[in-house]
Amino acid sequence: MTGNILIRNMTFQYESMLEPIFKDVNVNIHENWRLGLVGRNGRGKTTFFKILRGLVDYEGEVETTLEFTYFPVYPDASSEEMALEVLQKQNPHRELWEIERELSYMNLPAEILYKPFRVLSGGEQTKLLLIELFLNENAFPLIDEPTNNLDLNGRRVVGQYLKNKKGYIVVSHDEAFLNHFVDHILAINKESIDLIKGDVETWKAEKELADERSEEQNAQLKNEIKRLNTVSNRVNTWGNKRESSTHDSTERRLAAKQMKRAKAIKKRTDEKVEEKKRLIRNTEEVEGLKMKVKEPRKRLLYLRHFSILQDGFPLFEDLNVEVFPNERLFIEGKNGVGKSTLLHFLTAQEGFETTGEWEVNLPENLSILDQKNQGAFDYVSYVQSLTAEEKEDFWHLLHQLGMKRARFSNLPTNHQWSAGEMKKIFLSQALLGENALFVWDEVTNSLDLHVIQQLVESILHYGPTMIAVDHNESFVEAVSTKKIELVKVE
Ligand SMILES: Nc1ncnc2c1ncn2[C@@H]1O[C@H](COP(=O)(O)OP(=O)(O)OP(=O)(O)O)[C@@H](O)[C@H]1O
Ligand SMILES: [Mg+2]
């Protein structure tokens, strides 16, 4: 057997779910592929990795001799391990020069090796954990959403790094990032799984064609389903009638035989009906997302030679910028330069030391989407805290974002949301009510391509005023009206 991954008739379902996440999946993944795994939030990408890693019980077979490693696996928060120690975990035999070479590919200075891993920035930690996986040349890395802590430049660097490696699977919702390196795409659709050669562009073009075709076919399919159902019913009643209409034993045997045949025909037609129904359901439907937007009355922000001080030193070089109603300012800059700090200053203002001139006019109705740790959120109590009207709006928003009510109105308190589902809950929270200014920090993290597109469309349609940070290139290009870059003071 080669080092491929052979998946045969694999079926998996979480106990608390109504339907299986995977049903009779058959795929063959080559050990040398740079495979991008895409699919809408909650479709089962992280679960697919759990299956390959043997963490959950499934039906069917997954045959492989590959050894899987996984991202993200962080050291304990309290661990004092140095970066070098973390890097040597997968493979303690790698020489220092090899490790340093990998660091240079990731644009990291060699000194970083001797710092505690714990103090490094999110982007630096991500890069190190990825290097760690590739230092073990026998392993096949399964990489789940590596971009969340990476700024634009970091995404390019990591994209280039992955392009020079082979034999791994990466889950990401950032198309531009994936297109740097993938040579195959495995897409988890609504009712099927596609495996294609090429990048996200190729897959999207093929999917679009297929969707168009199936939309045309849908009408035809519906007619056919109707016809097949009539056949199925007719065959059924006909078989039943024959059998009960006579007392002669030879006749009855004959009738029973015909009944059996009728049943087989019915079964086949019913299967065909199911298959056609599935084809209809496989096209993605994305609804419009409603944003209630109020126009602010005056200039929201004015900064002249402005910076925020930390321990008496400016975090970033002087800023000069203004934001007027209907503008959307995106703040760019490397990891750790102070983008989120600037957003916090805008919404709180107190407790910051600053230089230069500033004026902030916050409207009353503010939508804040923070980059906070979202793990501790208690969904059930949150929903209970809403008024009946808010609850309706909240559920409606979730519904528009593609989360079906049946799946979330009756959940155990400890339900394990997928990363994107969690983000959609926070986004719906931020979209509640009518807002005059949207201060959004990394809204696109964890969201799938369709939701990002949905957001772009509704932002362009409703024209909110926004001050935001985001690392998704195509999103920023589509919705920003203004950009500033924060530059670290050296
Ligand atoms: N332990 C669990 N028990 C029950 N349901 C679960 C469990 N873990 C995940 N789920 C559900 O299974 C579905 C698939 O989750 P999974 O995390 O695999 O999605 P995903 O494709 O990785 O999504 P995302 O893009 O948002 O990360 C989701 O609807 C999620 O709510
Ligand atoms: Mg996931």
Image: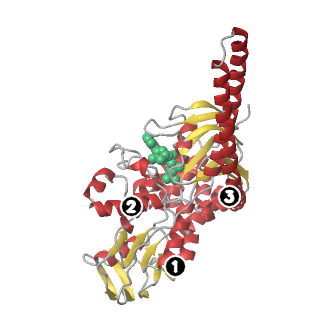
Where does the image place residue 123, in percent across and percent down from the top left? Answer: 49, 61
The residue carrying mark 2 has its beta carbon less than 8 Å from ligand 1? no
Name the residue beneath numbered marker 1: 480
Mark 1 residue element? loop
Amino acid beneath label 1: Ser
With 85 as the anchor, is 138 left or right in this view?
right
Mark with earlier residue (1, 3): 3
The type of colouring in the image is secondary structure
Name the residue beneath numbered marker 2: 426
Q: Of the numbered discs in the image, which one, if any, rests on residue 42?
A: none
State whether residue 412 appears in this view. Answer: yes
Query: Is the residue 280 above or below the residue 160 in the image?
Result: above
Compare residues 93 and 30 and report the one nearer the observer.
30
Mark with earlier residue (2, 3): 3
Identified at 46% across, 84% down, the residue is: 327
Quarter of the image where one finds residue 342: bottom left
Mark with earlier residue (1, 2): 2
Amino acid beneath label 2: Phe
Name the residue beneath numbered marker 3: 215
Q: How many residues crowd around disc 3 within 10 Å: few (fewer than 14), some, or many (20 or more)?
A: some
Q: CA distance from mark 1 to mark 2?
A: 21 Å
Identified at 47% across, 40% down, the residue is: 18
With 377 as the anchor, is 256 left or right in this view?
right
Identified at 42% across, 48% down, the residue is: 406
Q: CA distance from mark 1 to mark 3?
A: 33 Å
Q: How many residues crowd around disc 1 within 10 Å: few (fewer than 14), some, or many (20 or more)?
A: some
Compare residues 367 and 333 and report the one nearer the observer.
367
The residue carrying mark 3 has its beta carbon less than 8 Å from ligand 1? no
